[in-house]
Image: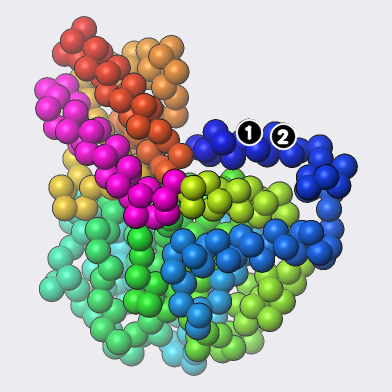
Amino acid sequence: MLPAAVLEQARDELMDWQGSSLSVMEVSHRSPPYQGLAHKAEADLRDLLKVPAEYEVLFLQGGATGQFAAVPMNLLRKKTRVSYLDTGIWSQKAIAEARHYAAVIEVASGHSSGYRDIPPEFEWQHDEASAYLHYTSNETIGGVQFQHIPDALGIPLVCDMSSDLLSRPLDLSRFGLIYAGAQKNMGPSGITVVIVRGDLLGSAIRQTPSIFNYGIQAAEKSMLNTPPTYAWYLLGLVLEWLKRQGGLEAIAGVNHQKADILYQAIDRSSLFHNPIAHTCRSRMNVPFLIKDTALESSFLSEAKQHGLVHLEGHRSVGGFRASIYNAMPLEGVNALVDFMVEFERRYG
């Protein structure tokens, strides 16, 4: 979901951006006006996240899936092992890609809990010879989210933050690198943000394509090739919107409120339930199940009649899933809760 104000501004500027009589999609990415747009987007992102000066901010293509390969290609630095936490489907995809480039040490896995919990850190099998430690901060499908930054014990910490970056304040100094596809909280699909500490640049393996080489992309200001200009423009509008909301501290408060309302409604229910451990429940993606699975189709069809859409759970876990990213207003969560209460009154 994108903020309504962003969609309205994009609509109003679609045919005439900055008085140019052109759409921003028709403007050269090398032109001074577009360069100004790109510089402002980076400045706003740095401001929101309080990015330290020694970190590079890159705007790339290929989604988080592209970064599953780019991270080991850039960060191995002549080492042969990398460490990964396995907390669900997206971390498993990252692990599978990393195995093309290095031996993967699984520091811990949520498999024994059915990926409904994160193993406590005292159980993790750290490998100090690894090039880095990678984790996924929020598993969108399973609904598991880290509520703290783990300790990498001296090796660079890497994180896929595709689904919760910009949803809360973040101490970036704890990380060697973070990356995120934009399509959850930052904008539309098609552009990916990478924030990498400067000392980790310049050591990519020889086979790394230039398009995925962080050092080259940093030197070219993310414009080695033509970037996804419209997605970058929309990302910039979302960043401006976030600043108008009061920044990450303010949006985190709203996100906490939305998640609390929905989880409390599920926990009070005798018809619906959430299977995730309380300590790692996601504030972005709330999965829930219904006791009588025969009611699933009725719930979805009636929800759609009430304007509540995209509530289907992923095919691998079933049930339902409410994604309540930054742009989802509190009214949307309240509407879902009201519908769930009424549905339970009739079918529970």
**Which element is circle 2 on?**
helix
Disc 1 to disc 2, C-alpha distance: 6 Å
Q: Residues within 10 Å of mark 2 (few under 14, many from 20)?
A: few
- Between 337 and 294, which is closer to the camera in this rendering? 337
Name of the residue lying farthest toward the bottom: 78
Residue annotated with mark 2: 12
Q: How is the image coloured?
A: rainbow
Locate residue 69: give its quadrant.
Answer: bottom right
Q: Is residue 37 visible?
A: yes
Q: Amino acid at mark 2?
A: Asp
The segment highlighted magenta reads: 245-274
Asked whether, in this view, residue 262 is left or right of residue 324, the answer is left
| Residue at x 35% of width, y 32% of height | 330
Q: Are marks 1 and 2 in contact (CB under 8 Å)?
A: yes
Residue annotated with mark 1: 8
**Which element is circle 1 on?**
helix
Q: Amino acid at mark 1?
A: Glu
| Residue at x 50% of width, y 89% of height | 199
Q: Residues within 10 Å of mark 1 (few under 14, many from 20)?
A: few
Which of the image's four quarters has the C terminus? top left
Answer above or below: position of 287 versus 126. Answer: above
